[in-house]
Image (cartoon, helix red, strand yellow):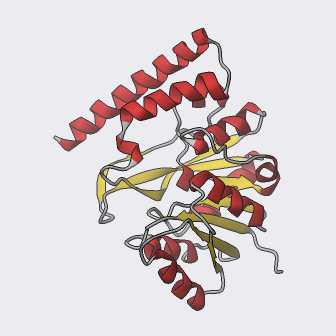
Amino acid sequence: MEKVTVSVIMPVYNCAAYVEEAVRSVLAQTVSDLELLVIDDGSKDDTFAIVTRLAAEDARVIPLKNSENMGVARTRNRGLDTARGDYIAFLDGDDRWHPEKLRVQIARMQAENAALSYTSYAIVDAAGNPSKAAYIVPERVNFNGLLCENVIGCSTVMLTRAVAAEHRFVTDFYHEDYCLWLDILRGGHTAAGCTAPLTDWRLIQNSRSFDKKKSAHNRWRIYRGYLKLSVVRSAWVFACYAVRGVKKYYSRRREDV
């Protein structure tokens, strides 16, 4: 098997309306030495047929299909077990990348000796048009900072192969990606942010991103049940999380006016 620089892991489920755009945004990267593992998790629509057609056009696309619905965490873990690249990147089937994303991240990680990198992202609607101001990430974040605000979007992330070999997505907590980033940073690894918006995050109504009460409940579960933080520390970082969330909400409300 040929060695590749980047393995891209894309879990898909009923993404027929968006998956071709997502796949082509990977194939258009200025880093061409890559493999794209598209793992269908039991779609009921034409998602897998579209991916199979794209794989026939470009051998870098590797279509895989779960024998049963496994959920996004286990599906990404299957990708991690299969990936061959020196770097591992994640992209959801309804998001997309700008052509220079992987190149910019690799350069940043090498310059900072970082195990993880992430980018700012534009927020687009179902049609792919900008719907809100881009979310601009900080150039660096540590474990304590990430407790207060998750600035790392899964579709923006790149990991080194070494750190990916040490970690997996948890399967029994909501926001499994957030748990993984916390694990990596708690282990002392460096995370480097790319402030340019190099990812387009598609915000679709009725997605789990819209359910703020559920997100808050599950954030508390991560603090107490997963990280085993004390009640006092959990309350403190939860308050920080809530305040930043409210500020972000009202900031976006002003944009919509």
Residue drawn 43% across and 78% down? 46
18 relative to 225, above or below = below
Most extreme residue toward the bottom, as rendered?
56
Question: Image height check: is 179 above or below 158?
Answer: above
Q: Position of residue 104 (x, y in %)?
A: 62, 59
Q: Is residue 158 above or below residue 220?
A: below
Q: Count the labels in the image.
A: 0
Q: Is residue 17 above or below residue 210?
A: below
Q: Residue furthest front?
A: 68
Query: Where's residue 228, x and y in %?
Result: 68, 21
Report whether residue 23 is seen: yes
Q: Is residue 105 visible?
A: no
* Quadrant where the C terminus is found in the figure: top left
At x 56%, y 27%, the residue is 221
Nearer to the camera, 131 or 54: 54
- Residue shown at 31%/61% (left/top)? 126
Rendered location of residue 226, percent (x, y): 65, 29
For the N terminus, the quadrant is: bottom right
Residue 171, given in percent of the width and then of the height, sits at 64, 45
Residue 96 relative to residue 29: left or right: left
Q: Nearer the viewer, residue 97 or 186?
A: 186
Q: Residue furthest left?
A: 257
Report the front residue among 62 and 66. Answer: 66
- Drawn side of residue 90 relative to residue 82, left or right: left
The quadrant in which residue 251 appears is top left
